[in-house]
Amino acid sequence: QQHSPHLSIQDKMSAAAARRRKQLAKKAALNSNSDPITDRMNSLLNTDEKVDESIAYEALQLAQSQVRRHVKSGEYEKATLVFGYDVSMILLQKHARISVASQHLALLAQVLKETHTVCDAKWIQRIVDIDKAYLNALDSISKDDMEDGERARLMRLHLKFLKSALSYSEILGNIRHGALEIHKLIGDQSWRLAKIAQDNSSSSTTTQESSNTTTPQEEDDEDGQTMSVTGLKCDAITHLALAEKPNDILELLRTLPKPTRAEITANHDCSPALRDELLTRANLVFLSVQNLRDAHTLITTYVNTIEERTSSDLKKSYMSKTDGKAPSHAVFNSMLFEICRKDKKTGPLYNWLLRSFSTSELEKMYKPELLKGYTAKIGRVYFDIQPPPSMLATIENMMSMMGGGPAGGMAGGGINPAMMQAMMGGGGMGR
């Protein structure tokens, strides 16, 4: 049976109309600046269900191509905000695709600096929001669905992103050493990673907090980030000090054990107690950036609420040459604070105090070369003591990272009681 000519003509007309509609739709899409890459990315991510890893990775590739495209065309806000920040938040909040999001966040941190995007309050808040979304996404995944090693890896990647964000805020923000809020995020994240590292090595007898027995090769990961328990806790305290958070530091110090007998014995071979070490490190950071307010809060509260020994016992031990005790970190920090409060004429007292304490304690602490950078800067800022040329590079590196022995009591002989009282002043040794 043959088809009617009338139907054949209708079919032809329908086909022609369909082609015409497609041509018009394509022309309208071009005129409306519709982007097929963006459309595809949106179709992958804007779903009611969480996407799997392969789909998230395809969306990542599309988003990163858009970031690069808009950087090249000079559309920096679209590159950083729309295709950088917004896509990262969708991957974290809606789909909990943390590994994929971490790759996009690394690109975002790079592009923010590359495009010279100003680090204003809005971008600082966005970084805070990213931190919250990242950690919430990790918490939403049960231990059965993610191995401990993978969780630790993702936590390390987040710390790396936060440090990149801090660098961005230092370069393109208006706060020296970087935004306080980001320092706070890094401090908290470093302490979390220290806890993970400590839990993972709890069965080992070589990872006691009271001593740092790791080799330099064991302290850093492949990206050069500190990964030992002691190193991570020192980083945490340093960044919390730069964040101006003395009370947060004090709460962390409360969680640490008091010094052992070996750690407070004169001429001890081990590192000082971690609690003492972190107290001293925080105080040196506060003083090196001229934050006397928070240094006073730290020392006063520590002596009055954390230190087990009374101030009179500490002072007596500090002046003694025969009690067999190492110099107290609480006393040293109180004296250092009081010296810095006075005028530049107390420079000789500073030199004496530092010389006496360095050999017995500072040189046995984690990364002592950084501590020398802090003490050299304190000497230059408060007492016009110019560091030797060999120390200048150490000081600059330290700030860019913001990052004879005792024979009982103090080295170098006994101290005049009047001098001792002058240095004690009102620095918190009143209990």
Image (tube, rainbow, N blue to C red):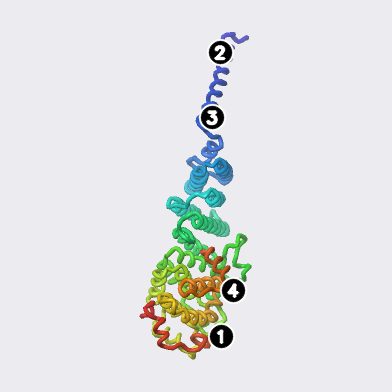
* Residue that mark 4 sits on: 213
- Distance from label 3 to label 2 (Cα)? 30 Å
Q: SS of the residue at dot 3?
A: helix
Which quarter of the figure has residue 417?
bottom left
* Residue that mark 1 sits on: 404
**Amino acid, disc 1:** Gly
**Amino acid, disc 2:** Gln
- Distance from label 2 to label 1 (Cα)? 106 Å
22 shown above or below 75: above
Q: Residue 189 in the image: state x and y as whole percent.
A: 49, 61
- Distance from label 1 to label 4 (Cα)? 24 Å
Mark 3 vs 2: CB contact within 8 A? no
- Distance from label 4 to label 3 (Cα)? 65 Å
What label sits on residue 10 in the rendered view? Answer: 2
Q: Which callout, 4 or 2, points to the residue nearer the camera?
A: 4
Q: Residues within 10 Å of mark 1 (few under 14, many from 20)?
A: few
Q: Residues within 10 Å of mark 2 (few under 14, many from 20)?
A: few
* Residue that mark 3 sits on: 30
Q: Nearer the viewer, residue 221 or 74?
A: 74
